[in-house]
Image (cartoon, grey):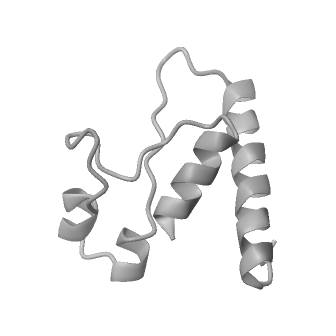
Amino acid sequence: DRQALHMALDLAGLACSAGSACSSGSSRPSPVLLAMGLPQEVVHGALRFSLSRFTDAAEVDAAIDILHRVVGKIRSAAGVRSTT
């Protein structure tokens, strides 16, 4: 559930979006991902993370750590076994 993940990541201090960059504030699936013909479960589970030229490797590593921890908690709460 991308909405639940989006909220959990926000609470953990990691900013992301459930919508596309051109539809600020919207949580509708990305029209780009839909146009690419990706499976619905992929499109409806996608989140967007933005980087800039000022984003450094330590920030990316920290984001990955937060993402890994939050996804693990959500999977654990849902009774889903981790694949990592």
Q: Residue at x 45, y 69 (%)?
A: 45
Q: Is residue 4 left or right of residue 23?
A: right
Q: Is residue 63 left or right of residue 34?
A: right
Q: Is residue 60 left or right of residue 3?
A: right
Give coordinates of residue 48: x percent, y percent. Answer: 43, 48
Q: Residue furthest top?
A: 54
Classify 38 as above or below 17. below
Q: Residue at x 31, y 55 (%)?
A: 27
Q: Quadrant of residue 44?
A: bottom left
Between 76 and 59, the one lying in front of the other is: 76
Give coordinates of residue 59: x percent, y percent. Answer: 69, 27
Q: Quadrant of residue 15?
A: top right
Give coordinates of residue 5: x percent, y percent. Answer: 57, 59
Q: Quadrant of the C terminus?
A: bottom right
Q: Is residue 39 visible?
A: no
Q: Is residue 64 left or right of residue 15?
A: right
